[in-house]
Image: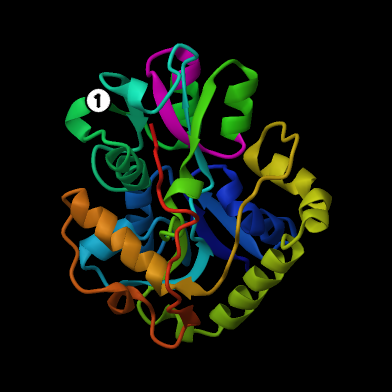
Amino acid sequence: MSPLRCGIVSRTATYWPLYLMARDGLVELVELGSTAAGVDALLGDRVDCAATCPDELMASGAPLRIGAGLVARPPTSLLARASFDSVASLRGARIATTSARGSVSTFLRAFLRAAGLEPRDYTQVAVGPTPAQADALERGTVDAAMVTFPFDERLERSGSRKLADVGDRLGPCAFTTINVREGWTRSEEWPAFRGALAGAMTRLADAHGRARELDALAEGTRGEVRTPPRVGYDAAVDLAAVERLIAFMRDDGTAVQGGAAAHVERGVTARARAWLPGGGPGDLA
């Protein structure tokens, strides 16, 4: 049987379990370049599943659903040129985004709003996913960017200043899910994929496992990785986290119909735990 085609946006630590599956020949990773491209790839049958932020599929109204979880809490950091010393100092700055609306920059704008910065308070520069944003920050064409590990680690080594851990401040909010065409989880291929995904996550469940698989992360992200990241992987769909993303989308001006359950495949493993912020958002400045 041919490996399943799984779309990913870019080469970051978000996809560590999928790198393990690709190394084992269980999936073929297809780089999409954007969250919106995942919707088109699913509808065009160019991929079997797409590991992206689910916001675009929820807003699209297309027959696509969330089939499994991947990463609920954003494994991202807000970094800036060394002359910026706080989130508040970004007022008037040029901040990289994946797109002007939607995609993972939904989380960045939610974070900045909580810090007292509305989109009118800074200039958004849409440059694409994390690798492009890291390059733009290093070249000086933007002043700040929210990037996913290991690009934050690499930027800090080259002189950028870390202003905040976005995931610690936002908590679970459906950063990346495994998205499918409606009904695909009833196919013969799904149980094997879902089981292999859970197995790969188990291999990364503790510090020893992450250390053992660090080479796979370095290979997957195509660069040096010095320390294992703090990323929580979970194949179950966190309904409360999806609801928080929906709230972020609406705050961002993106219309979405229905609640979390309306966008999840029937019969998939989901949990409806309440979100308890780790100390609350606090003073983000």
Considering the image in quadrants, where does the C terminus appear? top left
Residue bearing the label numbered 1? 122
From this view, report whether residue 79 is shown above or below residue 194: above
Is residue 49 something that shows in the picture? yes
Percent position of residue 212, x then y? 83, 52
Magenta stretch in the rendered image: 137-150
Percent position of residue 200, x then y? 70, 65
Percent position of residue 21, x then y? 68, 61
Percent position of residue 112, x then y? 32, 37
Element type where label 1 sits in the image: loop
From this view, report whether residue 183 is shown above or below residue 63: below
- Name the image colouring: rainbow
Q: Is residue 8 left or right of residue 213?
A: left
Kindly identify the residue that appears in the image at 76 percent across and 53 percent down. 210
- Crowding near pointer 1: few (<14 within 10 Å), some, many (20+)? some
- The amino acid type of the residue labelled 1 equals Tyr
From this view, report whether residue 228 is shown above or below residue 249: above
Foreground residue among 213 and 22? 213
Labels in figure, total:
1
Kindly identify the residue that appears in the image at 67 percent across and 65 percent down. 201
Q: Is residue 72 left or right of residue 57?
A: right
Q: Which quadrant would residue 189 be assigned to in this image?
A: bottom right
